[in-house]
Image (cartoon, rainbow, N blue to C red):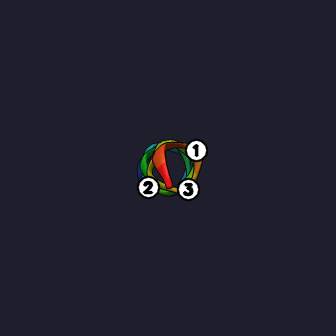
Amino acid sequence: MTENFILLVISNSNSNL
């Protein structure tokens, strides 16, 4: 559960860049 959340945050960060 936590890992998926972290991956989601990283994905959003890359999308913003």
Tag 2: amino acid = Ile
The x, y position of residue 5, in whole percent, is 44, 44
The x, y position of residue 2, in whole percent, is 41, 51
For marks 2 and 3, give the CA distance: 12 Å
Q: Label 2's element?
A: helix
Residue positioned 55% across, 56% down in the render: 14
Observer-nearest of 9 and 15 = 15
Q: Nearer the viewer, mark 2 or mark 1?
A: 1
Question: Could you classify mark 2 by the number of other residues whose Cα lies within 10 Å: few (under 14), some (14-19), or many (20 or more)?
Answer: few
Question: Could you classify mark 1 by the number of other residues whose Cα lies within 10 Å: few (under 14), some (14-19), or many (20 or more)?
Answer: few
Residue for badge 3: 14
Q: Nearer the viewer, mark 2 or mark 3?
A: 3
The x, y position of residue 8, in whole percent, is 53, 43
Image side of residue 11 versus residue 16, left or right: right
Residue for badge 1: 15
The x, y position of residue 15, in whole percent, is 58, 44
Placement of 7 over or under 8, stated as above or below: below
Say if mark 2 contacts mark 1, CB within 8 Å: no
Tag 3: amino acid = Asn
Residue 7 lies in quadrant? bottom right
Residue for badge 2: 6
